[in-house]
Amino acid sequence: MMNFAQHIKLYRSLIVCKLKKRSLFNFAFAFGLLCISMVAYPQQKPQPTTLRQKLMNAIDSKKTTDSLYNSLNSMQIKSALIIGYIGTLEALKAKHTWNPYYKLKYLNDAEKSFQKAITEAPHNIEIRFMRYSVEHNVPNFLGYNKNLKADREEIIHQIDKRNYGSADNELVKTIITFLIDSERCTPTENKILNQHLAAL
């Protein structure tokens, strides 16, 4: 027969065993709920209007540029528009750095990102506009302005068809105004743009 001390030892061991089983069950249950929630409630995609505002803030802020770039670049699934935003942020990283090597590196990265985005969504005027605005502002001697004509013509073509894609009316107004102010459009293109601007 077991003595009192042996009974106490056995009782304690049973309690520990039950607690371990309960902890294991609780962990399995919690993990299951987590998996279900990840399927039922996937990570929300950032809204374009929110990203546009953050991009505007990033123009004068290296910290915002780096933070937003890291956030978007960490996404496992990136739409063409997100890739376009990443290209814009890479161009801003070039703007914010003083190192000539990194300026060229980030511009090269931006060029690749824009090309990938446009290959995936060739008629998206927002992506085309982002690349156009970057190439318009980069000094000509760097050679990063080879797509200005193609982007301008495609943007105007899609606007004329009222195919705005991801762009809302406010962004379309911004795009049209930017194109006119860039002084790169032909008189005919300016006429088309002004007509659409008046109609918005």
Image: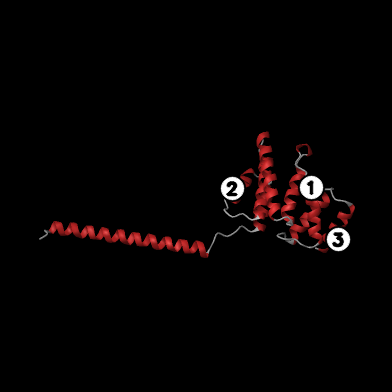
Q: Is residue 125 left or right of residue 27?
A: right
Classify residue 15 by image quadrant. Answer: bottom left
Q: Amino acid at mark 2?
A: Asn
C-alpha span from label 2 to label 1: 28 Å
SS at mark 1? helix
Q: Amino acid at mark 3?
A: Gln
Q: Is residue 156 above or below residue 91?
A: below
Q: Residues within 10 Å of mark 1 (few under 14, many from 20)?
A: some
Which residue is outermost to the bottom?
40
Q: Amino acid at mark 1?
A: Leu
- The dot on residue 167 is none
User: Residue at image x 81%, y 56%?
Assistant: 156
Give the image location of residue 108, x and y in percent. Answer: 68, 41
Question: Which residue is the site of mark 1?
Answer: 148
Give the image location of residue 186, x and y in percent. Answer: 88, 51
Q: Give the camera-side residue of 154 and 193.
A: 154
SS at mark 3? helix
From the image, state whether disc 3 or disc 1 is nearer to you: 1
For the N terminus, the image quarter is: bottom left
- The dot on residue 70 is 2
Q: Earlier in the sequence, mark 2 or mark 3?
A: 2
Count of numbered circles on the image: 3
C-alpha span from label 3 to label 1: 22 Å
For the C terminus, the image quarter is: bottom right
Q: Residues within 10 Å of mark 3 (few under 14, many from 20)?
A: few
Q: Are marks 2 and 1 in contact (CB under 8 Å)?
A: no
Q: Is residue 24 left or right of residue 175?
A: left
- The dot on residue 195 is 3
